[in-house]
Amino acid sequence: SVVTYIMAGENKTEVKRNGNSIATLDAGQSLVVRDTALGDSFTSDKVVQVDILAGDVGSAYELRWLAQIPREKWGSTYLSPVGENAGPTAYVLYNPNPTSLTVQYDGAGFSCPMTSCNITVPSEDDLVLVVGSDNLKLSDDYSGIKFYADDEFYVFAEVDADGMGNLFDWGFPLIPMDQTTSQVLVGDGRG
């Protein structure tokens, strides 16, 4: 199940879903959209904060709360320091473009089954790349992964993505490389 939470930063903020007005919010007010689907677009006329929640209904665990970045800030290169074999990390790559997109990935401490590490993400669709699968094997000296393509796309990570969700159970959006800095604050650095 996927739910979107939207919170307004200013009074009289109009929120639209796929071009249709769904609410007007005042500063601090929030909206819960319970039936979010792949490809849904949320826009507003003023600043909002958008988070996506995903998990299993009725589960005692397995919830991921992912802050979103605005579409105009999506990029073509992303970095992730996280990869986990015990509770495998899955990277969800979304291609908003009208044609398929080849995304390459590389880094230190993992191997691919082919000479070049790349996958093709269908147009206006997503593809899941799971660490520990045949497409991406980690070694003990893993130190990060870089995703890059010729056009913009979006990536978020799900840690402990093997369907069990009872080990670490968290996730995060990857930040486009052109928006990263030389400083970082790490709340939990396992993985």
Image (spheres, grey):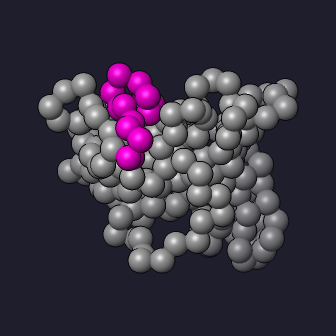
In the image as oriented, which residue stretches furthest toward the front?
A: 140
Q: Quadrant of residue 24?
A: bottom right
User: Where in the figure is residue 78, as x and y percent of width and height?
Assistant: 36, 56
Left or right of 176? Residue 100 is left
Q: Quadrant of the N terminus?
A: top right
Please tell me whether residue 135 belongs to the stretch shown in magenta.
Answer: yes
User: Where in the figure is residue 103, as x and y percent of width and height?
Assistant: 27, 41
Seen at 65% across and 58% down, the residue is 188
* Of residues 190 and 28, the one drawn nearer to the viewer in this rendering: 190
Seen at 44% across and 33% down, the residue is 131
Left or right of 66? Residue 135 is left
User: Where in the figure is residue 162, as x and y percent of width and height?
Assistant: 58, 25
Left or right of 189? Residue 94 is left
* Of residues 93 and 16, the one drawn nearer to the viewer in this rendering: 93
Q: Quadrant of residue 182?
A: bottom left
User: Where in the figure is residue 40, as x and y percent of width and height?
Assistant: 55, 42
What span is in magenta? Answer: 126-142
Classify 68 as above or below 131.
below
In this rendering, does residue 180 appear at all?
Answer: yes
Seen at 52% across and 72% down, the residue is 184
